[in-house]
Image (spheres, helix red, strand yellow):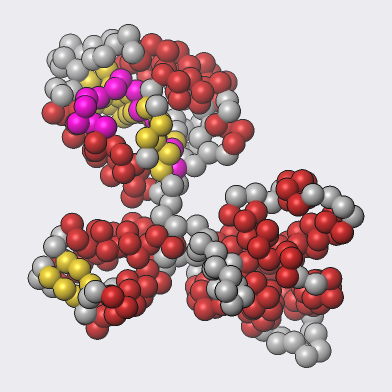
Amino acid sequence: MHLAPAQLVAHLKSGLRSLYTLHGDEPLLIEEAMDALRAAARTAGYTERTVHTVMGARFDWSGVLAAGSSLSLFAERQVVELRIPTGKPGKEGSAALQHLAESAAANPDVLTLVVLPGLDRATRSSAWFTALEGHGVMLQVEPVPRSALPAWIAERMARQGQRVAAGEPGQRTLQFFADRVEGNLLAAHQEIQKLALLYPAGELSLEQVESAVLNVARYDVFKLSEAVLAGQPSRVQRMLDGLKAEGEAEVLVHYTLSEDIRALKRVKDALAAGRPLPMALRDNRVWGVKERLFERVLPRLAEARLAELLQAAHRVDGIVKGLKQPDWPQDPWQALHRLAQMLCLLCVPQAGQPAPARAR
C-alpha cells in the first residue's frame, strides 16, 4: 500500500498495520509522519520503543531481527524503529530486511517503522525495498515544491489561527514568506511558529511578516538549473546570491549551467538528425522536471543562440579558473550571473504560453 503523507492521519483512524516504510529527504515531514505513527501506536497499546540506526557494514542485524520476532518481558506491544541514513543496508541488511518484511504480518504485537532517505530508481527496484513495499505501507515524502510553498505556509498558519489578507495583497505576503524560506522547510516551520508567539490569532499584514520572518532560504545548484530553464530571472538572481553567500563553489555552479547548455545542444542536434524528442531526451539522461522544461524550451532555441550560449559558457569557464575574458566581468560570480540570465531570458514563457510549474 502506498500513502501520501497527507493521507496518513485518515489511514491511522482505521487502525495500524505492522510495517511502515518512510523514505524521502524532507526531515520535517518525515518526523511529523513518525510522530503521528508513534501517537497512534501509544493509543493502540504499544508501550515500548527501541531505535536502531544502521551505521557501517558492521551493524549487528541480529538485534533488529530479535526485536521484531519476540515480545518484551515488560510490555505487551513494542515499536521497533529502524533508521538507515545511507539507504544502503548492504548484503546482510538486504536479507534481514526481506525477512523482517515477510514476518511482519505474523507478529501484530510488533510495529516496525523503517526510515530511509530519498532513493534512486535502482534502489527502489531492489529485492529488500520491494519486500518492504509488498508487505507493509509505503510513504514517499516529497519536498514541497516552490509553487506549492505559499499554500503550504497558509495552511500551517491557519492551524495556529492566523491568516493573510484576501486576494492579491495576501498572495504578495505569502510569496515574500516563501522567498525567505525556500529550500529550508524545517526553518519555514519554525518561522511560522514564531508568528504565533509574536502576534495574536487573526489576519497578519505584509509589514508584520516582513519584520518577523528571517531570510533562512537554502538553495542548491540543481534547483538553480530548474529555475533557469523555467525562465524565472528574479528567482535565479536570488538563488545565485544565496549560493554565493553559502560558499558554494563557482566551478560547480558553472558546471551545472554549462551542462544544461550542452544537453540542450545535444538534444537539438539529435532532433535535427531525425531522432524523436522522447528518445533524444532519454539518450541524454534528461527526465523528470527537466524533461518538461526541455520540451517547452527547445522549439524556441535557434542553432545560432545555442552556439552563442556554448561560447559564453566557455568564456565563463576561463573566468572561473582565473583567466581574463574581454567584454566579460572578471569576477566569477558576476560572470555566472550573466551566463545564467542569458539562458534564463531565452526560457521565459512567451505571451499566451502558460508558465511552467515552478521547479521542485
Vertical order, 183 against 335 (above or below): above
Q: Residue at x 13, y 28 (%)?
A: 43
Residue 241 x %, y %: 52, 77
Q: Give residue 112's quadrant in the image.
A: top left
Residue furthest toward the right? 273
Q: Is residue 221 visible?
A: no
Judged left or right of residue 218, residue 157 is: left
Q: Is residue 31 a member of the stretch shown in magenta?
A: no
Q: Give residue 312's quadrant in the image.
A: bottom right
Quadrant of the rendering where the N terminus is positioned? top left
Residue furthest toward the left? 200
Vertical order, 336 against 37 (above or below): below
Q: Is residue 12 a member of the stretch shown in magenta?
A: yes
Residue furthest toward the bottom? 327
Q: Residue at x 24, y 74 (%)?
A: 166
Q: Residue at x 68, y 58 (%)?
A: 295
Judged left or right of residue 172, residue 147 is: right
Q: Residue at x 54, y 68 (%)?
A: 355
Residue 140 x %, y %: 43, 39
Residue 358 x %, y %: 50, 63
Judged left or right of residue 266, residue 207 is: left
The total of numbered circles placed on residues is: 0
**Magenta residues?**
11-24
Judged left or right of residue 281, residue 304 is: right
Residue 22 x %, y %: 39, 35
Q: Is residue 36 visible?
A: yes
